[in-house]
Amino acid sequence: MGNILIDEVLNQKNNDVIKIINLINQTNDNKLRSELVFTLIDNFKDKRIIPALIDLIKREDLKNHNASFVFACNEYSPEECKNRIDFFIDLVINGDYETSMASAQLILDFPEPYKWSENLLDKLENKLRVSLEENIQNKEFIIDVLKMFSDDD
């Protein structure tokens, strides 16, 4: 009896996560999408959540909402985001101000020992410095982010 109940609960949880992710992807109502995202991250622990949030960030039609999706990634689990460091570095460099700042904060919030890894910070700083040499819009912001990472050591 106990195993059957556990299986039913886990199956229902799995179905609920799928249903919420599908609703998030299908709705055109930004307020509802935001409510669904935070319902998902506040109530479930599931390996599909970060990939679903990253898919939202990649959607061109939702570009103006990227900062809130990055914030949701950070709120949910910086630990699960650390293996996507290149993606978030690119957001620091190429995102609008809010998205860049949210991405920089997410990287700073990576849990130890990853947070203080020389390799991680060197990789980030090198990519930011290379982007400074290119013709990009966020030059002043990237200089500020480099200072932010230097100050966090």
Image (cartoon, helix red, strand yellow):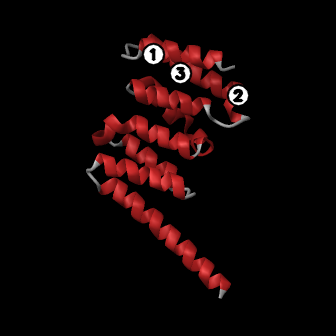
- Which residue is the extreme one toward the right? 113
Q: Estimate the spatial distance between the alpha carbons at disc 2 and disc 3, rounded to whole Å.
A: 17 Å
- Which residue is the extreme one toward the bottom? 1
CB within 8 Å, label 1 to label 2: no
Three-letter amino acid code at disc 3? Answer: Lys
Three-letter amino acid code at disc 1? Answer: Phe
Snapshot quadrant of residue 134:
top left
Q: Give the numbered dot on residue 141.
A: 1
Task: Please state the horizontal and vertical placement of residue 7, each as a whole percent of the image.
Answer: 59, 78
Residue corresponding to mark 2: 116
Three-letter amino acid code at disc 2? Answer: Trp
Task: Please state the horizontal and vertical placement of residue 100, each as a whole percent of the image.
Answer: 45, 26
The one of 134 and 51 positioned closer to us in this rendering: 51
Task: Please state the horizontal and vertical placement of residue 78, each as a whole percent of the image.
Answer: 59, 41
Q: Estimate the spatial distance between the alpha carbons at disc 1 and disc 2, rounded to whole Å.
A: 22 Å
CB within 8 Å, label 2 to label 3: no
In terms of sequence position, does the residue under pointer 1 or pointer 3 come before the other? 3
How many residues crowd mark 2 within 10 Å: few (<14), some (14–19), many (20+)?
A: some
Q: Is residue 43 above or below residue 62?
A: below
In terms of sequence position, does the residue under pointer 1 or pointer 2 come before the other? 2
Q: Estimate the spatial distance between the alpha carbons at disc 1 and disc 3, rounded to whole Å.
A: 14 Å
How many residues crowd mark 3 within 10 Å: few (<14), some (14–19), many (20+)?
A: some
Q: Residue at x 64, y 15 (%)?
A: 151
Say if residue 52 shows up in the picture. Answer: no
Q: Secondary structure at mark 3?
A: helix
Q: Give the numbered dot on residue 27.
A: none
Residue corresponding to mark 3: 127
